[in-house]
Amino acid sequence: MDLVTKAGDALSPGKEEDGGFSGRLYIPKIISQGPAKEWMERRKLAIRPWGSFLDQKRFSRPQSVAELCRRAVSNVEHFQSNYVFVFLGLIVYCVVTSPMLLVALGVFFGACYIVHLRSNQKKLVLFGRELSSAHQYGLSGAVSFPFFWMAGAGAAVFWVLGATLVLIGGHAGFHNMESSDGSELEMEPV
């Protein structure tokens, strides 16, 4: 099956000979076009090798707070894309391990999909006023808010932020970057 991603295309009917779907995935236009897509492509291209990212031989305790700060700044600049994917991995882990959060996300995206389909057919009128698409998406968020509340989405957000801070902060502070060209001069603290 050919997995061709088309912006804005829902799983469209395929050729008559296969009798099924063509394998085109629906990706919202905001993600598949413009700045979001360009940013994600730049992140993918800037990923450092995971072998050097996870090399245990390069981890050591910094000698001083100044060295810890220097390592953290250097590693955040060097492994920025890797850290973004660690963060995204923690989000996916948190969502997959929480069934109620999956239900809440399903309700939210289902409501957004219904708004998307309905906006193509006819306008929604509520209390004699026509609602714009933005108001309809806001209404879908309001409908799904109780589900997010019951799922503990706030706790999940803070867990992801805390785990990210610990993992990325620990890696950035304890991963020793070796100078590749030897041109940098190291000064000893006085």
Image (cartoon, rainbow, N blue to C red):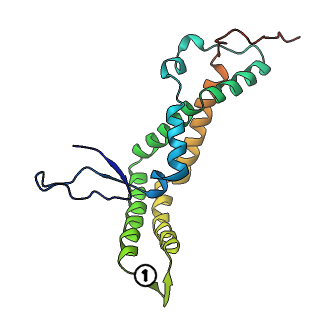
What amino acid does circle 1 point to? Leu
| Residue that carries the numbered disc 1 in the rendered image | 124
Q: Which of 92 and 36 is in front in this view?
A: 36
Q: Nearer the viewer, residue 103 or 110?
A: 110
Please state, as top left, top right, bottom left or bottom right, where the C terminus lies in the image: top right
SS for callout 1: strand
Q: Residue extending furthest right?
A: 190
Q: Residue 7's spot in the image, x, y percent?
A: 39, 55
Q: Residue 37's spot in the image, x, y percent?
A: 50, 47
Residue 87 in view: no
Q: Residue extending furthest left?
A: 17
Residue 12: quadrant of the picture = bottom left
13 up-or-down from 168: above or below: below
142 up-or-down from 73: above or below: below
127 up-or-down from 14: above or below: below
Please state, as top left, top right, bottom left or bottom right, where the N terminus lies in the image: top left
Q: Residue at x 35, y 70 (%)?
A: 117
Q: Which residue is drawn at 43% across and 57% down?
A: 28
Q: Residue 71's spot in the image, x, y percent?
A: 70, 21
Q: How many labels does the image show?
A: 1
Q: Residue at x 42, y 65 (%)?
A: 112
Residue 25 in view: yes
Near mark 1 (Cα within 10 A), the count class, few <14, some 14-19 or many ≥20, is some
Q: Which residue is drawn at 21% across and 58% down?
A: 13
Q: Which of 115 and 25 is in front in this view?
A: 25
Q: Residue 109's spot in the image, x, y percent?
A: 41, 60
